[in-house]
Image (cartoon, rainbow, N blue to C red):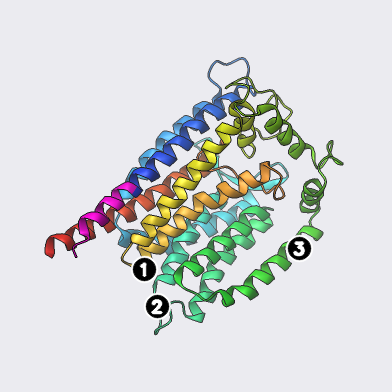
Amino acid sequence: MNRGPVEVTRGVEARTALVAAASVLAAIGCVAVFSASAALDLERALPPHFARHVVALLIGGALAFAASRLPMSAWAGLAMPLWGLSVIALVATASLGLVGGGARRWLAVPGLGFAFQPAEIAKLATVLAVAVVLARREGRADVAPRRFGLAFAVAGVPALLCLIQPDLGNAVLLLGLAGLLVFAAGAPLRWMLVPSALGALGVAVYSLTQPYATRRWLGFLDPWERASTEGFQLVQSFVAFGRGGLFGVGPGNGRQKLFYLPEAHTDFILSVVAEELGLLGVLVVLGAFAALLVAGLRVALAARQRFPMLLAFGATALVAVPGALNAAVVMGAVPTKGLTLPLLSYGRTSLLVACLAIGMVLGVARESGGRRRRAARNR
C-alpha cells in the first residue's frame, strides 16, 4: 500500500505543531520578561532587558530558519569543529570569564560590548557531536561498546569544564543528554546502570564538598525552615504560585518580581507566569512544552537515517529537558540548578541555542519529507 502521502501529511503536522508550540512559548516569554524586567528599571518605558530579549528572539528566528535549510551532511561535518570551539570557549571562561552570582560562566566578546555563556553553546555542540559518534554502527550492534564510551567522553569533557565554573546543573544536563542519545541509539538499558550510579555518586560527593551546592540542597529539603537564607528563593516562588491562583493577578500586576523573587526574569520566570497568569498560564506553558516534545519525537521517529534521527531526538531534548527541570525547580520538586526556561527566560545565549535546536528539528523534518515525497513519486 502507498503510504507516502500519509507520511508527508504527518510530517507537515509535526512541523506545524513544533512551530506553534515554540511560538506560544516565545510569546508568553516576551510578556513575562517585559513584566519582570520592568521592575529593574522603572524610569524607562521600554526595559533594556526586554529590548535585548526581543532582538535576540528576532535573531533566533532567523537562525532557526537558516538551520532548517542546512542539509544534514553539513551538520554532521560541523559537529566536531563546533564541539572543539565550545571546549576552547569553556577553557577560556575558566580563566578569562566574567564572574556573576559567585560563578564564572560568561565570556566577553572584545570590542562588541556583550558576553555569552559558552556552556549553552557546548550543550548544542555536544548533542551534535554525540549524534555523529553514535550514528556510525560497528558490526551488527546498534551501539558498539567503544562508541558508548566515546559518547560519554565527548559529553564528559565540557561537563568537567562546567564544574570548574562552577555549574553543576549544566554539567549534569550534558551527561544526561548524552545518556538519552545513547538510549535512543539502541544501547541496552543495562549498559546505563554503571554510568548512572557513577553520576549519582559524583553529584553526591560534589554536593557535600562544594558549599554552594550544599546550601542549595538544604534550601530544597526544608525551605520554610530556612526561608530567610538558603530557602528564600524557593519560598518566594511558592508565594508567587499561591498568589496567582487559577487565573492570576493579571499581566504586570505581580508583586513577587518587585525584588522579592531573585532572578525573576531568568531562572524563575515561570513563577512570574504563575503569579500573573495563574495556574491556567502555567498549564499553557507546560502544555506547549509537551506539544513541542511530542512533535520533535515524531520528527525523530519518522527520520529514515540514523544521524537525522539522533539529531532530532537530541535537539528536542535540548529544549524539553531543561524546560522540565526548570519547572521542577520553581515548584520545589528538585534543588535549584541555575537553568533557564528555554524560549521564556531572559538569557540571549540560551534563547539563540533553543531557536537553533528547533531549526535543526525542522531541518530533519524537511529533509525526511523530501525523501518521502521522492520515494512516493518513484513508486
Q: Residues within 10 Å of mark 1 (few under 14, many from 20)?
A: some
Query: Which residue carries the number 2 mark?
Result: 137
* Rendering coords of residue 242 (x, y %): 71, 31
State how many labels appear: 3
- Tell me whether circle 2 and circle 1 mark residues in contact (CB < 8 Å): yes
**Residue depicted at x 61% and y 27%:** 36
User: Range of the magenta residues?
Assistant: 1-13
Query: Which residue carries the number 1 mark?
Result: 306
**How far apart are labels 1 and 3 at the CA level?**
35 Å
Reading the chain from its start, which is encountered first: label 1 or label 3?
3
* Amino acid under disc 1: Arg
Query: Which residue carries the number 3 mark?
Result: 204
Q: Is residue 60 visible?
A: no
Reading the chain from its start, which is encountered first: label 3 or label 2?
2
Q: Main secondary structure of the magenta part?
A: helix
Q: Is residue 124 above or below residue 154?
A: above
SS category of the residue bearing label 1: helix
* Rendering coords of residue 63 (x, y %): 38, 43
Observer-nearest of 305 and 202? 305
Q: Is residue 48 visible?
A: yes
- Tell me whether circle 3 and circle 2 mark residues in contact (CB < 8 Å): no
* Rendering coords of residue 317 (x, y %): 50, 55
Observer-nearest of 79 and 237? 237
Observer-nearest of 243 and 89? 243
Reading the chain from its start, which is encountered first: label 2 or label 1?
2
* Amino acid under disc 2: Arg
Task: Residue lying at the far bottom in this picture: please name it.
Answer: 139
**How far apart are labels 3 and 2 at the CA level?**
35 Å
Q: Residues within 10 Å of mark 3 (few under 14, many from 20)?
A: few
- Image quadrant holding the C terminus, namely bottom left
